[in-house]
Image (cartoon, grey):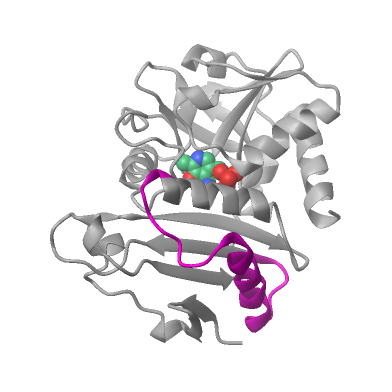
């Protein structure tokens, strides 16, 4: 079935799903987005994703043309129109067409786009053998400059870090913040396990409030495991027993090497595996 994309109030063929070059989303990365998963026809954590999208929009004074209930309905319509049950859904809201100047208030018609497509997962070997990461020189955006809680269409900060990772021969980076503490990956949050306790950087470290991050913290606590949100240093990463990253697309992916240091045994650890099992059970049998 040919993909149909929701844009400007209607579903159109993929080849006709176009944004003007005068849209400030294109000119300035002025807009917000979400990446969401559907498992077996059920959109996972839809309310949480919509809350984050609407909060991101509010933070940049961007009006979303539909309300939350309407967006919800349209997302389910996008799945139906495309005959999808397991899908990756990309929502974006651009500022709309304006002049060549920055002024967002000249853009009268924000554009909502919904793409529902098949999910392309990371290769299985990453989940079996674990990822290697490097910390990079590009720090995460300072929260007073552009708060990382805003999931904006301007991902250059993360892209610069990704370039550093790839040129260093690995696929994902660990970004530090302006204080030198661990922040997050370029498209995922990071966790460590030490002596049975789970730790992840707090929101105050300047990170995106990952939906998967929250699910993992809740799952761990349900299992009576201690889960802390605390500042972490590179030393904490190097000396962890286990490490993993979380995200909508990646779910839970083990990390076995950081900056050349082998983490724990160098293999995905038991806590990571247990949490992955619980996560799979939750998403596949909600
Ligand atoms: N951090 C960043 C910078 C991201 O882009 C993402 C992916 N949206 C995440 C963390 C993980 O968030 P989530 O679990 O909501 O996908």
Could you tell whether 42 is left or right of 122 in the image? right
Q: Which residues are magenta?
A: 59-87
| Vertical position of residue 151 compared to residue 119: above or below | above
Q: Nearer the viewer, residue 157 or 166?
A: 157
Q: Residue furthest left?
A: 101
Q: Nearer the viewer, residue 83 or 238?
A: 83
Q: Is residue 82 magenta?
A: yes
Image coordinates for residue 80, horizontal then vertical, percent: 68, 79
Q: Is residue 248 magenta?
A: no
Image coordinates for residue 107, horizontal then vertical, percent: 26, 64
- On the question of residue 253 being in view, the answer is no
- On the question of residue 141 being in view, the answer is yes
The structure residue drawn at horizontal position 37% and vertical position 16%, both measured from the top left corner, is 179
| Vertical position of residue 168 compared to residue 156: above or below | above
| Vertical position of residue 123 compared to residue 66: above or below | above
Image coordinates for residue 50, horizontal then vertical, percent: 58, 54
Quarter in which the C terminus is drawn: bottom right
Quarter in which the N terminus is drawn: bottom right
**Toward which corner of the image does residue 247 lie, by quadrant?**
top right
The structure residue drawn at horizontal position 68% and vertical position 75%, both measured from the top left corner, is 84
Number of numbered tags placed on the structure image:
0
Q: Nearer the viewer, residue 143 or 65?
A: 65
The structure residue drawn at horizontal position 58% and vertical position 40%, both measured from the top left corner, is 210
The structure residue drawn at horizontal position 51% and vertical position 52%, both measured from the top left corner, is 53
Image coordinates for residue 208, horizontal then vertical, percent: 50, 37
Q: Nearer the viewer, residue 139 or 269?
A: 139
Could you tell whether 224 is left or right of 17 in the image? right
Could you tell whether 85 is left or right of 137 in the image? right
């Amino acid at each position: 079935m040919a993909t149909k994309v929701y844009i400007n109030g209607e579903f159109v063929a993929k080849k006709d799903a176009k944004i003007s070059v005068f849209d400030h989303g294109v000119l300035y990365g002025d807009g917000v987005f979400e990446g969401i998963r559907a498992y077996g026809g059920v959109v996972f954590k839809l309310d949480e994703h919509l809350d984050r999208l609407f909060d991101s929009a509010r933070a940049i004074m961007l009006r979303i043309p539909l309300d939350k209930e309407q967006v919800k309905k349209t997302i389910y319509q996008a799945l139906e129109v495309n005959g999808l049950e397991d899908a990756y859904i990309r929502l974006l809201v651009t500022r709309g067409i304006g002049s060549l100047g920055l002024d967002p208030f000249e853009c009268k018609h924000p554009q909502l786009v919904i793409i529902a497509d098949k999910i392309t997962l990371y290769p299985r070997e990453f989940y079996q053998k674990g990822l290697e990461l490097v910390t990079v020189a590009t720090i995460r955006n300072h929260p007073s400059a552009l708060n990382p809680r805003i999931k904006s269409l301007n991902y250059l900060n993360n892209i610069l870090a990704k370039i550093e990772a790839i040129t260093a021969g690995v696929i994902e980076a660990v970004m530090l913040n302006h204080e030198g503490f661990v922040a997050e990956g370029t498209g995922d949050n990071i966790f460590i396990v030490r002596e049975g306790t789970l730790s992840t950087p707090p929101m105050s470290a300047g990170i995106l409030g990952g939906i998967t991050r929250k699910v993992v913290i809740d799952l761990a606590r349900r299992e009576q495991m201690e889960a802390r949100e605390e500042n972490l240093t590179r030393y904490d990463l190097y000396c962890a027993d286990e490490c993993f990253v979380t995200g909508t697309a990646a779910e839970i992916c083990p990390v076995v090497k950081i900056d050349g240091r082998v983490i724990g045994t160098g293999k995905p650890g038991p806590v990571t595996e247990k949490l992955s099992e619980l996560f799979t059970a939750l998403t596949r049998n909600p």
